[in-house]
Image (cartoon, rainbow, N blue to C red):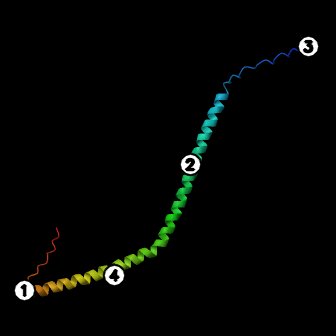
Amino acid sequence: MEQQMQQPDPQPVNPAPQPSSGGSSKVWLWIIGGCLGIIIIIGLILGGLAWWGARKIKNEIKNSKPKIEQFSREMEEKAKSLEKINEELEKQAKNAEKSGVGIELPENTSD
């Protein structure tokens, strides 16, 4: 009766499968494919950022053109105002020189 209750023979243990020579080339294909995929994704992201930046700059230039023109007009008005002030100062200096006050203006020496 003891022989009948014996456990069945254990199943033979299969050794770990040996990698075949063709399997390593598949690994390299996966590695190269993964790297190329990452490079393509980064390229798409950079291209999208460049496109977005170009549109943003174009819109800023379009919107700031009136401001630039206004600034240019204001600077022209200020330049004219400074020219008038300069003419007045020259007249006052000439009058002071004639009256003998002795104000000397520095001479414009251009080399």
Density class for disc 3 (Cα within 10 Å; few <14, some 14-19, many ≥20) is few
Q: Is residue 76 left or right of residue 26?
A: left
Density class for disc 1 (Cα within 10 Å; few <14, some 14-19, many ≥20) is few
Q: Is residue 64 left or right of residue 76?
A: right
User: Label 4 near label 1: C-beta < 8 Å?
Assistant: no
Separation of marks 2 and 4 at Cα, in angstroms: 51 Å
Secondary structure, mark 1, is loop
> Which mark sits nearer the N-terminus, 3 or 4?
3
Q: Residue at x 89, y 15 (%)?
A: 5
Separation of marks 1 and 2 at Cα, in angstroms: 79 Å
As drawn, the label of residue 100 is 1
User: Label 2 near label 1: C-beta < 8 Å?
Assistant: no
What's the residue type where badge 4 is placed?
Glu
**Residue lying farthest left?**
100
Residue that mark 2 sits on:
42
89 vs 58: above or below: below
What's the residue type where badge 2 is placed?
Ile
As drawn, the label of residue 4 is 3
Secondary structure, mark 3, is loop
> Which mark sits nearer the N-terminus, 1 or 4?
4
Given residues 63 and 7, the one toward you in this image is 7
What's the residue type where badge 3 is placed?
Gln
Image coordinates of residue 47 in percent, x first then y, are 55, 54
Separation of marks 3 and 2 at Cα, in angstroms: 69 Å
**Mark closer to the observer (3, 4):** 3
> Which mark sits nearer the N-terminus, 3 or 1?
3
Image coordinates of residue 18 in percent, x first then y, are 69, 22
Image coordinates of residue 38 in percent, x first then y, are 59, 44
> Which mark sits nearer the N-terminus, 1 or 2?
2
Image coordinates of residue 4 in percent, x first then y, are 91, 13
